[in-house]
Image (spheres, rainbow, N blue to C red):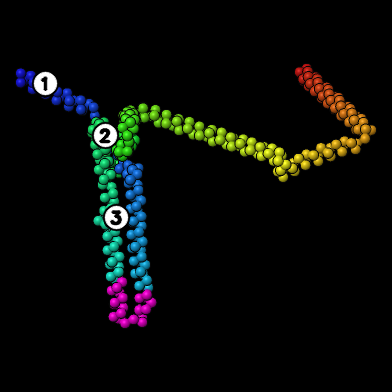
Amino acid sequence: MRKHFLFIFLVLIGINSIYSQTRGSKVGYIDMEYILQNVTNYSEATTQLEQKAQKWKQEIETKKIEIDKLKEALKAEKTLLTKELIEEREAEIQFLETEKLDLQQKRFGPNGDLTNQKTLLVKPLQDQVFTAVQDIAEAKKYDFIFDKSSDLTMLFAAKRFDISDQVLRVLNRAEKREQLTKKQLEAEEAKENKEDAIDENPILAERQKALDDKKSARDKLIEERRLAAEKKKQEFEERRQKILAEREAKKNGTVSETTKISETKTENKIDSSKTETAKVPAEEIKQKQIDARAKLLEERKKILEDRKKAAEEKRLKTLQVRDSIKKARELNLKTTN
C-alpha cells in the first residue's frame, strides 16, 4: 500500500514539473517613474517639494552674493587697511564660505533634506506599488516582474508585457473604494472585472481600443453638431428679436433710425422712377422702340453675313484640298509611267 502511494506521489510530482517546464515562464515589467508621475498625491507632493528646493537655492544664492560683496569690498580697500584688519576680513569671508558649503550640503547633499524628503515621499507609494505588483503576480500567475526604471538593464521590452497601467488601476481602485457606496462598489467591481479580462486577452484589448476611438470620434461629431445647432438657434433668435423690436417700434411710433433711413431711400427711389416715367413723352418712347427694332435687325443681318462668309471660306478651302490631292495623284502616275 505504501509503495502504491509513493508511486502515485512521484508520478504527480513528475507531471507537475513537466507541466511547469512546458508552460514556460510568464514575465512582466513595470515603469516605476511612469506610475509615480500618474499618481495624483505624488504629483502634488513633488510640486511642494520643488517649491521648497527653490526656496533653499535662493537662500544659498543670497549667502553667495553677500560673500562676493565682502570680497569686492576687501579688494577695493586692501591698500588702506592694516595687516590685522585684512586678516580679520579674510577670516570672516572664510567663515561665511564654510557656512554656505555646510548649508548646501545640509539641503542638497547625499543625506540632505531634499534626499530625505524625497525618500519620505516615495517610500509609502513604493510600498503600495509593490503590494499591487504582488497581488497582480499571484492573480495572473507571473513568474517574474521587473522594474524598467531601476538599474536593471533592459535592452528590449515589448509593450504587451508592461503592466504599469494595471498597477495604476489597482492603486486608483483602492483610493476610490474608500469613497464609494455599496451599489457603486458593485458597479466598480464589474468594471474592474471587465478591465482585467481585457488585460488578459490582447485581441479584446485591441477591440476595446478601436471601440473607444470610435466612441470618441462619435462624441466629437455630436458635440460639433450640437454647437452648430446652438449657433443657428442663436442667430434665428437674434433675427426674431430684431423683427419684434422693429414691429414694436412701428406700433409705438418710435421707428429706429436705420429703418427710417431705409424706408426713406425706398420711397425716394419709387418717387424718382415715377417722375422720370411721367417726364418721358409718348413719341420719344415710340422712337426708342423703333430704334431698338432696327438695331436688332441689323445684328441679325450681320450674323447671316458672317455665316455666309464662313461657309464660303470653308468651300474654298475644300476645293483647294481637292486640287492638291488631284495634283498629287497625277504626279504619282507620271512617276510610275
**10 Å crowding of disc 2: few (<14), some (14-19), many (20+):** some
Cα distance in 3D space between marks 1 and 2? 33 Å
Q: Secondary structure at mark 2?
A: helix
Q: Residue at x 42, y 31 (%)?
A: 212
Which quadrant is home to the N terminus?
top left
Give the magenta part as a residue range. Answer: 73-93
**Residue 74 magenta:** yes
In front: 212, or 270? Answer: 270
Tag 3 or tag 2, which sits nearer the N-term? 3
* Residue 334 picture location, percent across and down: 79, 19
Q: Residue at x 36, y 65 (%)?
A: 62
Residue 8: mark in rendering: 1
Cα distance in 3D space between marks 2 and 3? 33 Å
Residue 133: mark in rendering: none
Q: Which residue is mark 2?
A: 136
Q: Which residue is mark 3?
A: 114
In front: 305, or 19? Answer: 19
On screen, residue 179 above or below 60 = above
Q: Secondary structure at mark 3?
A: helix
Q: Residue at x 33, y 43 (%)?
A: 39
Q: Residue at x 17, y 27 (%)?
A: 17
